[in-house]
């Protein structure tokens, strides 16, 4: 089985074609980049539970060797903060800041656990006319229960990885969320990519708990403003119920 990245040196990874994005075949989708950064910060935060991941996509991440570095910036028994960066040719192309919180068994009030209809009730979009293989059409599986690619407006989509992030390693729950959450702007776009570009230079994920299982659901909606700025917000679920929320700032421009 292939993977989204394979190692070519110490902490250096080369992307597979399946990690590419829909805007440019020579640049990565934000999801694999976010998942790679998540993988880097997880051991630094351990044993605390990751509860926030903020990714800054500083420039197009190329299909080229990528060096990943992580460090602990705030240590503690209850709270930890770590950051990570992705470099290409000594230039930083993406960064992340992650927050971890200790876990403790407590009695809490009962709360709603409703979620959208499950992935078995959704449908896979037709990708037969896509110009090339990339993350959005071959790297993940989609099961839409509301909306679809190319249909403007809010959408609800179950997403799971088709391949591992790196060889011989099961993706962690945080990596699965990071890979899926970057789809919020793409599935809920208000244009079918004919007139407008709606690129997200960032991604922030807040989690009340880590997901269980392979499927991550995004209930996503976007808003565009006439000054060229937008936002995409996604409620996140696994098959047991709500797990958190993700938000993306949007750079809007004409095609």
Image (cartoon, rainbow, N blue to C red):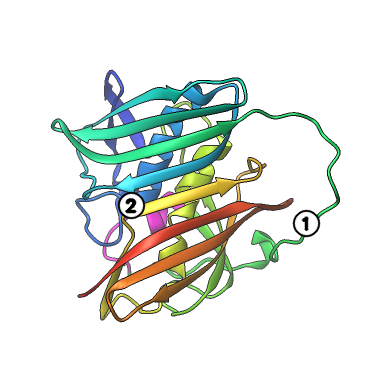
The quarter in which the N terminus is drawn is top left
The quarter in which the C terminus is drawn is bottom left
Q: Which residue is mark 2?
A: 29
Q: Which mark is residue 113?
A: 1
Front in this rendered view, residue 80 or 4 = 80
Report if residue 133 lies within the magenta region. Answer: yes
Asked whether, in this view, residue 238 is left or right of residue 96, the answer is right
Any part of residue 75 in sight: yes
Q: Quadrant of residue 245?
A: bottom right
Give how far across and how far down residue 129 sits, in percent.
33, 71
Residue at 44% over, 31% down: 39
Vertical order, 238 against 73 (above or below) = below
Asked whether, in this view, residue 132 is left or right of residue 174, the answer is left
Residue at 40% over, 49% down: 31
**Secondary element at tag 1:** loop
In the image, which is nearer the foreground, mark 2 or mark 1?
1
Any part of residue 162 in sight: no
Give how far across and how far down residue 155 sits, in percent.
53, 71
Spatial separation of the CA atoms under disc 2 and disc 1: 31 Å
Vertical order, 115 against 89 (above or below) = below
Residue at 38% over, 76% down: 224
Labelled pair 2, 1 in contact (Cβ < 8 Å): no
Q: Where does the magenta region start and end?
A: 130-140
Which class describes the residues within 10 Å of circle 2: few (<14), some (14-19), or many (20+)?
A: many
């Amino acid at each position: 089985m292939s993977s989204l990245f394979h190692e070519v040196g110490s902490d250096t990874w080369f992307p597979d074609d399946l990690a590419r994005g829909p805007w440019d075949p020579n640049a990565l989708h934000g999801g694999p980049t976010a998942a790679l950064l998540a993988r880097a910060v997880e051991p630094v935060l351990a044993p605390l539970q990751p509860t926030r991941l903020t990714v800054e996509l500083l420039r197009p991440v190329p299909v080229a060797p990528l060096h990943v570095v992580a460090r602990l910036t705030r240590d503690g028994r209850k709270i930890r903060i770590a950051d990570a960066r992705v470099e290409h040719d000594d230039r930083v192309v993406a960064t992340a800041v992650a927050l971890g919180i200790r876990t403790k068994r407590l009695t809490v009030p009962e709360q709603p656990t409703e979620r959208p209809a499950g992935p078995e009730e959704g449908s896979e979009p037709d990708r037969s006319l896509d110009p090339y293989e990339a993350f959005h059409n071959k790297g993940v599986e989609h099961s839409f229960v509301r909306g679809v690619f190319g249909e403007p407006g809010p959408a609800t989509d179950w997403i799971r990885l088709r391949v591992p992030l790196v060889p011989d390693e099961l993706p962690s729950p945080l990596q699965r969320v990071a890979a899926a959450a970057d789809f919020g702007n793409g599935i809920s776009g208000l244009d079918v990519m004919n007139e407008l570009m709606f690129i997200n230079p960032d991604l922030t994920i807040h989690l009340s708990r880590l997901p269980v299982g392979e499927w991550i659901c995004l209930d996503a909606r976007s808003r565009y403003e006439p000054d060229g700025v937008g936002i995409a917000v996604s409620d996140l679920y696994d098959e047991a119920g709500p797990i958190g929320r993700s938000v993306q700032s949007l750079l809007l421009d004409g095609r």
